[in-house]
């Protein structure tokens, strides 16, 4: 894990301890980490054949993560779905929706 990712994870753990909430840490092409009260789950990234533009990737990730958790999915499933949305977002220029979804 890079120093930057370690710092993000440390910040997430600190935020969780202060606020009593779970935290999600994104690591770009290295996937993401979910920090809960009892566990730390690493979720691998979805492969992207050709990265075009990262605009909107974070919005797609956060929106799908929130929706999946609101629907009652566990953290691992929600993170996988969010990573898929982020991976889809980087395949085209700008913040355009994927017509295949």
Image (cartoon, helix red, strand yellow):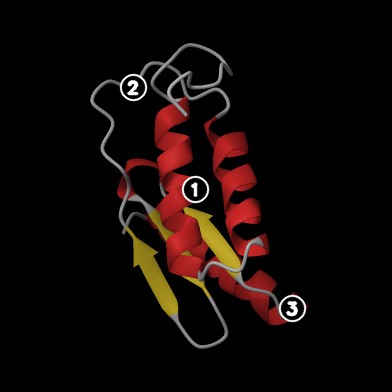
Q: Which residue is mark 2?
A: 51
Q: Position of residue 50 (x, y in %)?
A: 27, 20
- Mark 1, residues whose alpha carbon is within 10 Å: few (<14), some, or many (≥20)? many
Where is residue 9 shown, x and y percent of the image? 49, 65
Left or right, residue 64 beside residue 92: right
Q: Earlier in the sequence, mark 1 or mark 3?
A: 3
Work out whether mark 2 precedes mark 1 in sequence or the reverse, and give the earlier one. 2
Q: Are marks 1 and 3 in contact (CB under 8 Å)?
A: no
Whole-angstrom CA distance, mark 2 to mark 3, is 36 Å
Residue reaching furthest top?
Answer: 93
Q: Return the residue nearer the eye: 44 or 2.
A: 44
Judged from the image, the secondary structure of the residue bearing numbered disc 1 is: helix
Q: CA distance from mark 2 to mark 1?
A: 17 Å
Of tags 2 and 3, the one toward the viewer is: 2
Question: Dot 2: what SS?
Answer: loop
Name the one closer to the observer, 11 or 94: 94
The number of numbered badges drawn on the structure is: 3
> Image height check: is 29 above or below 81?
above
**Residue 87, located in which quarter of the rendered image?**
top left
Which residue is the site of mark 1? 82
Q: Using the image, tell me which numbered label, if any, was put on residue 20.
A: none
Residue 35's place in the image compared with 11, above or below, is below
- At horizontal 58% and vertical 46% (from top left) the residue drawn is 64
Neighbor class of circle 2 (other Cα within 10 Å; few <14, some 14-19, many 20+) is some
Q: Position of residue 40 (x, y in %)?
A: 43, 76
Label 3 CA crowd tier, 10 Å (few <14, some 14–19, many 20+): few
Above or below — where is 37 with respect to 15? below
Q: Which mark is residue 18?
A: 3
């Amino acid at each position: 894990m890079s120093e930057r990712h370690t710092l993000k994870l440390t910040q997430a753990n600190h935020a969780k301890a202060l606020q009593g909430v779970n935290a999600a840490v994104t690591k770009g092409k290295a996937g993401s980490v979910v920090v809960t009260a009892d566990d730390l789950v690493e979720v691998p990234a979805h492969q992207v054949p050709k990265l075009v533009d990262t605009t909107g990737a974070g919005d797609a990730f956060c929106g799908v993560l929130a929706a999946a958790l609101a629907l009652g999915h566990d953290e691992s499933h929600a993170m996988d779905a969010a990573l898929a949305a982020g991976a889809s977002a980087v395949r085209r220029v700008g913040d355009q929706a994927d017509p295949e979804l």
